[in-house]
Amino acid sequence: MISIPSEFFNRRFFHETFGKRVIHVEAPHLSKNQLENHLRKYNSTCYCITPVNYDYVRKNLGCSLSKKEFHAFLKEFYSSIKRKGINLQLHVHISQELGKVPFSTKRKLIGGAYNFFKDELKITPKEIVYGWTSFDDDCINISKSLGLKSVTYKHFHIYDFWLKQSKPYHNRSVDSRQKMVSKIARGKILDIGFADNPNYYLRGEVTGIDMKKTSTPNNYSKCIVGNFNSLINSKIKESFDAVTALEFIEHIENPSEFFRNCKKFLKRGGILILTTPTPYYWRTILGNLAYPKGRATIIPHLHDFIPRILNNVAMSEGFEVVDVKNVNSKIPFVNWQLLYVYKKK
Ligand SMILES: [Zn+2]
């Protein structure tokens, strides 16, 4: 049998192995102690989020602090790790669509972060890393005028929230699948298993349901804590235009039951939108060959659906297959998630 470390199939492997000395600090409110321990152990450079990115942190990393509290918290936390000799530099999220951002906004964000360091932490930062490695000439020029060197290459790094056992999941693939789903789902929407990654792109009347308790995202009208299987007899039966369940079905025991229950939530003609990993992703194919005995510790999935088989299950439960789309890449084998759209007959 070929011997490849199983972590090879984990996207984070290289960063976690080689990136320990560079940290992107996104969620110090979650990772505080772990972060501090790690910094001391590896003497890492910290590229730090600042209060200018409060909205980004609140939306993506579940921050319940007010803007003022967040500012005060960052000031205190960064000051304390600065005293321990940690090298702090700037991390600023501008936008993933820079073309739509006016120059003045870029200046406000970068300048604001710089001033926070100068005024509140008494640090003159030397470097800046842009969130999502999304930057343009404006960003570089603004930074340069403040004496900051822009780090414009993708360096190996880890995120502070990776240091925690339960990691909020922040990356482009979450973003791309959520955007795709939000373009399809309309009207009254039920979002199943939303708590780890609320979909801030959804528009309409959104109800979230999850076993985990979490605060209600801004664009959701209601959140229910519990198992969606147990809700069927309640008032919300057959009341939804759309049901969405992203990266969910591979975790549950009974996919047929899942379709049956989703059908009960939907109005006639309502749509069900799922995303789930594709078995044709190259790492999965290699992993399947290398680990026929299975390793439940890599990712706790119970299923990996061949599209034709998943569609069979859906059809046998009374759905029509509307669409199957790649989420991450147009190229099969590079793409690792599929989006399925079904319609209740
Ligand atoms: Zn970031």
Image: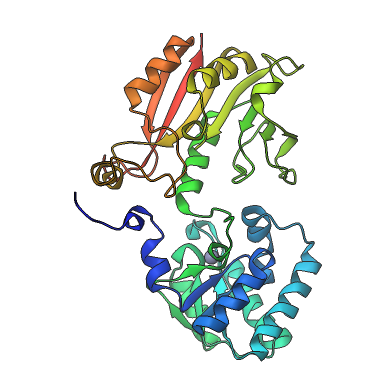
Figure disc tally: 0
Q: Tell which of 83 and 164 is nearer to you.
A: 164
Residue 173: x, y in percent? Answer: 45, 48
Give the color scheme: rainbow, by chain, secondary structure or one colour: rainbow
Q: Is residue 154 visible?
A: no
124 with respect to 288 (left or right):
right
Taking the spot 59% from the left edge, 45% from the top edge, the residue there is: 197
Q: Is residue 28 visible?
A: yes
217 with respect to 329 (left or right):
right
Residue 210: x, y in percent? Answer: 66, 36
Taking the spot 60% from the left edge, 69% from the top edge, the residue there is: 104
38 in relation to 262, above or below: below
Q: Tell which of 331 and 225 is nearer to you.
A: 225
Taking the spot 51% from the left edge, 23% from the top edge, the residue there is: 254
> Would you identify the image quadrant in which residue 58 lies?
bottom right
Residue 275: x, y in percent? Answer: 46, 34
Taking the spot 44% from the left edge, 46% from the top edge, the residue there is: 299
Outermost residue to the left: 1
172 in relation to 201, above or below: below
> Would you identify the image quadrant in which residue 304 lies?
top left
Q: Tell which of 214 and 110 is nearer to you.
A: 214
123 with respect to 269 (left or right):
right
Residue 6: x, y in percent? Answer: 33, 54
